[in-house]
Image: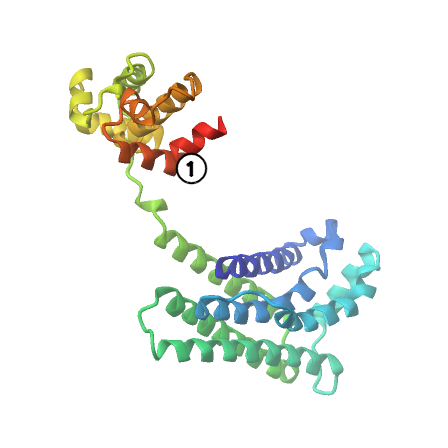
Amino acid sequence: MFKKLFSALLIVEAIILLERLLVETSIIESMPHFLGISYPISFLKPPLMLLMVLALTRKDFRLSKFHFWHLIPFGLILLMNLPFYTLNGSEKLDLVKSFMENVPSYKSFEFYFTLSFFLYIGAYIFLSVKKLNVIRQQVINNTLINWYRIVLICYSVFLLAHLIYFVIQPLGGLSFEIVNQLSMLAMTLIIQSVAFKLIEQSNLLNSRTPEIENINQRKVDLELIIKAFDQDKIHLIDDLNLSKFSNELNLNKDYVSALINQKFDCSFSKLVKTYRLEEAKLILKNSDPAKIKLIDVAFDAGFNNKVSFYRAFKESENMSPSDYLKKL
């Protein structure tokens, strides 16, 4: 559930960032109907942040009807924005331009309405960090919890700086345009830090560079390997192992293992098991069910015992050989 909520949060951030980028680069003038999309969905971020914490700290967490109450602010803002969505392109552009250039005063409704958003998102971040701190009193070495807590704290620092700027804006006549640009940079930094962390935790950058200097020779050797299985039926030898197989082909054992792994994305033993299983299924299809003995099928397909035969069937077909025979 955490991954799904986290994905939703990144999508929301991406949409907000896209609209701000279009505005800053003036591309929005050629597609003005994109304006206003990000404003309502920005009210989805605080609930998503809190729900992610719940998903992290509760093993059996599931979304319930109660959690959808958190979407009320989003729904209200969406309704309030409906008149804006009915405007034509030029009217939208004029309205947004006026908003960007306008410096709110302490007496205006817009100032306190925007201030309430800071309080809204701040309350959610405070609750989220507080819940994570409670967990960390018991579990201090959970990498994901610690990392998400740092992200929330960094986000709250940015939010506080944004709030201070907004509060003093009427005093100095500061432009909201600067805030928008700084906000874009902060959001980009957060998304990039998330991407870096995910890549760092994955095996994406740890993959070995394949040794493919002599690609023509590799092609020939791969054809030898495939021929050994498809035509020579070498997998029917019950005591076949990587060393014997490599000797049969007059190739280096490690080289053969690497070729199989890179071509078939599996180990030598896994490949042998796959071929033996296909052989067993072929025998079962072409035999008389009344006369067939499963142990004979196992030996004929190259398996050297009944246990490995049954285990291979269970892993591949999610059923025993006898059930597979009945299905046929």
x, y percentage for residue 78?
74, 66
Nearest to the observer: residue 196 or residue 305: 305
Q: How many marks?
A: 1
**For residue 256, what is the image quadrant?**
top left
Q: Residue at x 49, y 58 (%)?
A: 3
Q: Is residue 107 rendered to the left or right of residue 8? A: right
In this picture, residue 110 sits left or right of residue 51: right
Q: Is residue 321 left or right of residue 80?
A: left
Residue in front for this viewpoint, 102 or 308: 308
Colour scheme of the picture: rainbow
- Where does the image place residue 54, in percent across and percent down from the top left? 50, 70
Residue to which mark 1 is pinned: 319
Callout 1, which amino acid?
A: Met
Residue 183: quarter of image? bottom right
Does any portion of residue 267 appear in the rendered image? Answer: no
Q: Is residue 294 above or below residue 122?
A: above
Q: Callout 1: helix, strand or loop?
A: loop
The residue sitting at 64% across, 77% down in the picture is 117
Task: Inspect this view and state whether residue 281 appears.
Answer: yes
| Residue sitting at x 31%, y 14% | 227
- Identified at 40% across, 68% down, the residue is 145
Q: Nearer the viewer, residue 148 or 153?
A: 148
